[in-house]
Image (tube, grey):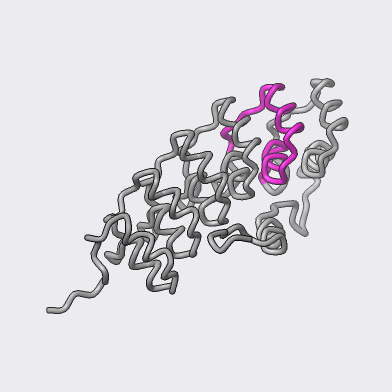
Amino acid sequence: MSELSDEASEPELLNRSLSMWHGLGAQVSREELDVPLDLHTAASIGQYEVVKECVQRRELDLNKKNGGGWTPLMYASYIGHDTIVHLLLEAGVSVNVPTPEGQTPLMLASSCGNESIAYFLLQQGAELEMKDIQGWTALFHCTSAGHQHMVRFLLDSGANANVREPIYGFTPLMEAAAAGHEIIVQYFLNHGVKLDATDHRGATARMLAKQYGHMKIVALMDTHSPSLPKSLYRSP
């Protein structure tokens, strides 16, 4: 692994993936059990033939949510089952339906670095700038998770790199700088993001990188904009 690499390790990605799983809770009503869970399960574990049979039967609502508020497309997009995503999209499923947390299939794919699936979704009309209940777009999700190639793909697809989330006033660059994702910061710099943008406390991305001890990122940003403020606190 190069010294610039900031891709998460496999155990970290697994833990992150498991922390996002939304299945049925412990208490399941009879009405919830009437939902075709076989389709959701098949989509989540990659059983292509089962999903194909469900699609061909034309008896099931392919957009129906299970007890966790997820559709088959959400599961396939999140876990990374390309062929099932393609099958469901060809069947005409809704591409922008969100989870209870407001996360679309594109956000779910982005959070796990599933680039080919993100491509399929965008081709079928996925909205690049939709926001979840935190105010995060797909670009925020892949930035936070450290998925370098997905960040570059979304930027090349026209994602707004200067978008802000409402809680802290962070931009994706600030998120990357605070998390120490050096290569992603480089992508944003190459993309021409605003370096002087400040969060709700008045901190720039450079200040956040310094605050969290990511001095390589500080140096990297200095080479792009040496005139940036160096500290949040100014002497009287």
Query: Is 89 above or below relative to 75?
Result: above
Residue 102 percent coordinates (x, y): 54, 45
Query: Is 124 above or below relative to 167?
Result: above
Specify the farthest residue to the bottom. Answer: 236
> Is residue 202 shown left or right of residue 37?
left
Residue 74 percent coordinates (x, y): 67, 40
As for residue 74 lying within the magenta part, the answer is yes
Residue 157 percent coordinates (x, y): 48, 33
Q: Residue at x 62, y 47 (%)?
A: 113
Q: Residue at x 44, y 55 (%)?
A: 185
Q: Nearer the viewer, residue 104 or 66?
A: 104
Q: Residue at x 71, y 28 (%)?
A: 86
Residue 13 percent coordinates (x, y): 67, 58
- Tell me which corner region of the image, top left, top right, bottom left or bottom right, holds residue 129: top left
Q: Residue at x 26, y 60 (%)?
A: 226
As for residue 35 lying within the magenta part, the answer is no
Identify the magenta region: 69-97
Q: Nearer the viewer, residue 132 or 14?
A: 14
Q: Nearer the viewer, residue 178 or 129?
A: 178
> Is residue 153 shown left or right of residue 40?
left
Q: Nearer the viewer, residue 174 or 183?
A: 183
- Tell me which corner region of the image, top left, top right, bottom left or bottom right, holds residue 106: top right
- Tell me which corner region of the image, top left, top right, bottom left or bottom right, holds residue 65: top right
